[in-house]
Amino acid sequence: MSSRWPVGPRRVLVVGIDGVRLDLLPELRTPHLDSFAAEGFLAPVQVDEATPTMSGPCWATITTGVGVAKHGVLGNHLGGNRLDVFPDFTTRLAAVHGRRTFAAGGWEPLFLARSGGPLFAAPGRLSYIAPLEDTPEAWEVCDERVTAEAAYVLGSSDDDPQASFVYLGAVDETAHFLGCGEEYRRSIETADQRLGRLLAAVRSRPGYAGEEWTVIVVTDHGHLDQGGHGGRTDLERTAWIAASGPGITPGAPVAPLHHTDVAAHVYAALEIVPDPHWTLDGRPFRPAAEPARALVSSAVPV
């Protein structure tokens, strides 16, 4: 049975944009990401040596807060996973803490019981919107529909999710089909426009002035120039995290990041102390000068 605790003003949104190369961002028109990062930080992440540079393992690490040795996702087929023991944050928050949670996107293994999934096993609300076919054009339509659905949910006071994950996949699909040329760069710029709509939806909420929002934008891996990933080159291993919210000083350097830190920061942003049995591998984001330490405690029980 879920334990239900009083819900305060804190809210978290994680936007996952698949396959965005960090080295290309300075060349592109991404005003929403740029202004958002200026309110907090945007910093690189290196996919660790144990993790294949593939979407399945990387998103599992990002959303569970543990590495591949624990969650067991080693490829884009999620079979053999241990997600029942190490669930994603939307599932854990709903089951353990009775929080309203939301996940949306169009890649099957993340949201459906196919290809060994789902990664998001049981959020409070789930919106799966499939692309009509596996092409860059169809994925752009899919991401557009996911954005519209997520903006509706995030902007409403009815559902009021305390923790949400929104997945956008068109950028990655474009690179696979067409490489990292003009079309890929345009897809990143379009994803930035969708990020702007999600941020606008949050800010339009009737109760926004009384809420404390943490927003995290993250990519899972990079791409070779010709498109593709899965190897150990710097282009494939370099990802990034951007974040703003309470406790994050605009423009201040942050300590070295790992993908596992995303879920850890979600819990900290909601003032939830992880149970030691969760054995999280990540830590909440912290200033570069601050030493690593245990997760910030609070009066919220676990």
Image (spheres, rainbow, N blue to C red):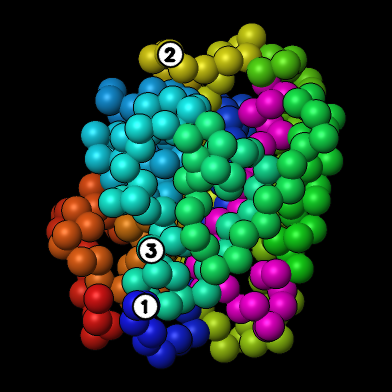
**Residue behind mark 2:** 231
**Residue behind mark 1:** 2
Above or below, comparing residue 29 to residue 10 in the picture: above
Q: CA distance from mark 2 to mark 3?
A: 31 Å
Residue 198, by quadrant, is bottom right
Position of 56 with respect to 265 (left or right) is: right
The numbered mark, 2 or 1, whose residue comes first in the sequence reads 1
Above or below, comparing residue 264 to residue 260 in the picture: below
x, y (%) of residue 67?
29, 39
Residue 8, by quadrant, is bottom left
Residue 198 visible in this rendered orientation of the protein:
yes
Q: Amino acid at mark 1?
A: Ser
SS label for mark 3: helix
- Viewer-nearest of discs 3 and 1: 1
Above or below, comparing residue 159 to residue 142 in the picture: below
Q: Amino acid at mark 3?
A: Arg
The residue under the point 76% across, 60% down is 149
x, y (%) of residue 261?
33, 50
- Image: magenta residue range: 153-175
The residue under the point 46% across, 76% down is 99
The N terminus is located in which quarter? bottom left
SS label for mark 1: loop
The C terminus is located in which quarter? bottom left
Position of 132 with respect to 111 (left or right) is: right
SS label for mark 2: loop
Mark 1 neighbour class, 10 Å CA radius: few under 14, some 14 to 19, many 20 or more: few
Q: Residue 92: which numbered mark, if any? A: 3
